Image (cartoon, grey):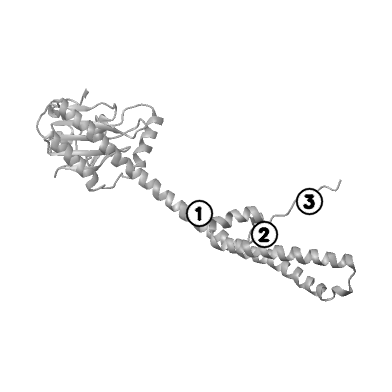
C-alpha cells in the first residue's frame, strides 16, 4: 500500500495557465509504455462519455463501503482525468490531469492513500484541496486492463481526514475488479459492433456476387448450350441421310448437350438459393473472376505444343 498525495476531484484548470503542472502531471518515463496505456484508455470508448448507472452504481457502493461523500471511477487520458462513474453532488466528471490524484495513483498498481491532503506539501495548494470541495482524505485502487496497463482508478474521497483500514482496501480491490469488467465491456461492445458491420458488408458482397454469378451463368453457359441444342436438332431432322459414323457423333453431341443443360439448370437454382453457395459454386464450377465491369470466366491455360 502506497501512502501518497490525493486527487483533487473538483479541481479546475486556472484560467491564466494553458499547460498546468502539478503533482498529478505525467512523470517522465517510457513514452512507448505511456502511448500503449493511452491506447488502452481510449479503447474503452468512454472518454468524454457518461456511462450511466452501470458505473455510477459501483461508485455509489464504494462510497457506502467507505462512508465517504464522494467516489469516482476515473480514466486517465493524456491531459485530463475523465470520470465515467461518479457518486456525490460535488463529484466532477472531469479534472485536469495536473491536479489529479488518480493520475498519481496509476504510477503503481498498489492502493494510493492520502490521509490528510491539507497537510501534504505535495497537495496542500491544489485547487480542490485549498478550495472547494476541500478534499482531505483520498483512497484509490488502480484499475488495469488485464494486460498490465493502468487505465484508471476507483477512488473514494472525503472532506475530513481519515485512515484507510484493511477492510476498506479489500472492498476497493473487489469493486475495482467489477469496475474493470464494466470499463472493458464497452471496448468489447465496440469490437462486436465493428464485427457486425463487417459481417453485414460481407453478406452484401455475397449477395452482389450471387447476382453476378447467376446472370453470368445464364449467359455464359445457357447461351452456347442453346446454340448447340438448336444445331443438334437441325441435324437430328436429317439424320436419315447421315452415315453411321455421323449419326453416332450426333447422338454423342445430343447427349452431352442434354447433360450440360441439366447441370446448368441445377447450378443456377443452387446459386439463387444461397449467397454462400454462390461463392462456393463460383470457385468450384465456373472458376470466375471479377472484371472491371462484369464477371467473366477465367481462361484455361493453354498446353505447350512443344
**Local SS, label 1:** helix
Q: Quadrant of residue 188?
A: top left
Q: Quadrant of residue 156?
A: top left
Looking at the picture, does residue 103 appear above or below residue 294?
A: above
121 sits left or right of 184 in the view: left
Q: What residue is rendered at 38% in x and 38% in y? A: 39
Q: Estimate the spatial distance between the alpha carbons at disc 2 and disc 3, rounded to whole Å.
A: 18 Å
Counting residues from the start of the chain, the first of labels 1 and 2 encountered is 1
Few, some or many residues within 10 Å of mark 3 (<14, 14–19, 20+): few
**Local SS, label 3:** loop
- Please identify the quadrant where the C terminus is shown: top right
Few, some or many residues within 10 Å of mark 2 (<14, 14–19, 20+): some
Looking at the picture, does residue 115 appear above or below residue 11?
A: above
Counting residues from the start of the chain, the first of labels 3 and 1 encountered is 1
The front one of 69 and 299 is: 299
Which labelled disc corresponds to residue 202?
1
Q: What residue is rendered at 13% in x and 27% in y? A: 116
Which labelled disc corresponds to residue 83?
none
284 sits left or right of 233 in the view: left
Which labelled disc corresponds to residue 296?
2
Q: Estimate the spatial distance between the alpha carbons at disc 3 and disc 1, rounded to whole Å.
A: 34 Å
Q: Which residue is mark 3?
A: 302
Counting residues from the start of the chain, the first of labels 2 and 3 encountered is 2
Amino acid at each position: 500500500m502506497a501512502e501518497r498525495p490525493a486527487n483533487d476531484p473538483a479541481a479546475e484548470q486556472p484560467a491564466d495557465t494553458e499547460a498546468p503542472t502539478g503533482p498529478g502531471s505525467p512523470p517522465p518515463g517510457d513514452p512507448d509504455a505511456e502511448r500503449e496505456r493511452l491506447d488502452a484508455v481510449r479503447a474503452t470508448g468512454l472518454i468524454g462519455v457518461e456511462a450511466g448507472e452501470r458505473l455510477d452504481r459501483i461508485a455509489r457502493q464504494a462510497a457506502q463501503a467507505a462512508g465517504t461523500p464522494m467516489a469516482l471511477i476515473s480514466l486517465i487520458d493524456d491531459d485530463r482525468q475523465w470520470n465515467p462513474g461518479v457518486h456525490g453532488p460535488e463529484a466532477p466528471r472531469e479534472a485536469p490531469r495536473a491536479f489529479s490524484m488518480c493520475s498519481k495513483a496509476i504510477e503503481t498498481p498498489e492502493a494510493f492513500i492520502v490521509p490528510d491532503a491539507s497537510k501534504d506539501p505535495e497537495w496542500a495548494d491544489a485547487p480542490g484541496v485549498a478550495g472547494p470541495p476541500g478534499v482531505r482524505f483520498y483512497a484509490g485502487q488502480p484499475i488495469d486492463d488485464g494486460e498490465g496497463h493502468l487505465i484508471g482508478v476507483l477512488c473514494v474521497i472525503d472532506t475530513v481526514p481519515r485512515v484507510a483500514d484493511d477492510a476498506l482496501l479489500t472492498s476497493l480491490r473487489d469493486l475495482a475488479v467489477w469496475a474493470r469488467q464494466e470499463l472493458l465491456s464497452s471496448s468489447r461492445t465496440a469490437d462486436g459492433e465493428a464485427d457486425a458491420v463487417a459481417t453485414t458488408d460481407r453478406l452484401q458482397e455475397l449477395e452482389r456476387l450471387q447476382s453476378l454469378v447467376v446472370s453470368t451463368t445464364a449467359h455464359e453457359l445457357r447461351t452456347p448450350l442453346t446454340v448447340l441444342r438448336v444445331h443438334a436438332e437441325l441435324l437430328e431432322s436429317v439424320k436419315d441421310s447421315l452415315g453411321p459414323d455421323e449419326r453416332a457423333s450426333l447422338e454423342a453431341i445430343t447427349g452431352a448437350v442434354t447433360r450440360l443443360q441439366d447441370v446448368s439448370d441445377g447450378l443456377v437454382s443452387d446459386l439463387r438459393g444461397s449467397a454462400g453457395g454462390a461463392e462456393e459454386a463460383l470457385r468450384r464450377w465456373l472458376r470466375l473472376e471479377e472484371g472491371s465491369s462484369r464477371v467473366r470466366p477465367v481462361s484455361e491455360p493453354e498446353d505447350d505444343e512443344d
